[in-house]
Image (spheres, rainbow, N blue to C red):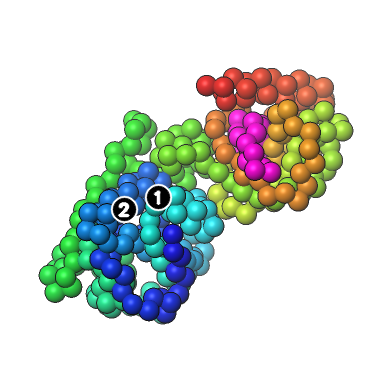
Amino acid sequence: MKLIEHLDDIKEPFKNGVVTIGNFDGVHIGHQSLLHEVVKKAAEINGTAIAVTFEPHPMRVLKKKNHPPLITVYEQKKELIEKSNIDVLICIPFNKKFASLSAREFIEDILVKKIGMKAIIIGKDYTFGRNREGDITLLSRLADDGGFEVILNDWIIAPHDTFSRISSTAIRNLVIEGKVDDAQKMLGRYYQVRGQVIHGRDRGGKLLGFPTANIKLSDELIPKAGIYAVTVECLDKQYQGVANIGYSPTFEDYQFTVEVHLLDFKKDIYGENIRVNFVKRIRDEKKFSNINELSGQIKKDIELTKEILSI
Ligand code: RBF
Ligand code: MG
């Protein structure tokens, strides 16, 4: 996949560009379906499969406060889009000046003239550009003169009755509620956080008998506090693990940590970058009256985790 992070790097239009546009936060199964259609259409017309996205996420630029946490930070978003076999990913640097471009200018000057768009595939309720003026209606109006085709891709109906439609917002809410197993169904993979292993309070191994890798997160969206069955990618291998997110109330020092105990693992991984995939939430954190009770509970958590992960 060719990555373009500045529009000036596009020296000539791509051959028969088949384009989709979006923020793609989460690169969930709805996004994956769009990307798949783009790849398919490009193959049909001997063209170039192109995804256009924005960086930073427009809500970062337009909405200073209270913007929701990203499901996938830039690095993971690029990786996931690359997996969809898209030929070119164009990440348009998003700033106030770019935001002031009208949707029509964006379509005519950037998508058609610069990128060489011959077809665009988007969801029927997707809007883009200033005042959200960019939509199916505007695209259809400009299609003949612009020499491109507009193809609708309907949202996949979610495979679960607790939610009706796949969206980044719905996934964020599920993760925040700890419903990582439901989030998985919309993401098409487990919700993942990444980060570096840092020194904790050196308590897990010595005091409890269960050492944990404490993680300095590079991600923004953190599942609800509690205990989770997880898998961990580290040192180019995958391990089983049990994660604890929260304040360890037994110890009353009220420091928020994300930590993971790796099953059947003895290596020193301080400083390593690791990835944690959330499979299922097991329970809330609890304040125990002594350390033995907490260790006993962690033992049970590990047994349950093994059962969950063996399915
Ligand atoms: N700390 C608590 O105070 N309450 C808990 O319920 C609790 N559950 C945990 C479950 C697991 C699987 C793990 C790995 C840790 C848990 N901890 C809990 C955190 C534990 O206190 C912490 O790992 C050590 O204090 C080291 O920081
Ligand atoms: Mg630790």
| Quadrant in the rendering for residue 42 | bottom left
The front one of 307 and 180 is: 307
| Quadrant in the rendering for residue 230 | top right
| Quadrant in the rendering for residue 307 | top right
Q: Identify the residue at the far right of this view.
A: 206
Residue that appears at 57% across and 39% down = 277
Q: Identify the residue at the far front of this view.
A: 46
Q: Is residue 295 magenta?
A: no
Numbered range of the magenta stretch:
224-245
Residue annotated with mark 2: 39
Residue annotated with mark 1: 84
5 vs 210: above or below: below
Residue that appears at 48% across and 57% down = 78
Residue that appears at 66% across and 46% down = 274
**Camera sees residue 62:** no
Amino acid type, label 2: Val
- Mark 1, Cα crowd under 10 Å, few <14 / some 14-19 / many 20+, is some
Q: Secondary structure at mark 2?
A: helix
Residue that appears at 41% across and 55% down = 24
Amino acid type, label 1: Ser
- Mark 2, Cα crowd under 10 Å, few <14 / some 14-19 / many 20+, is many
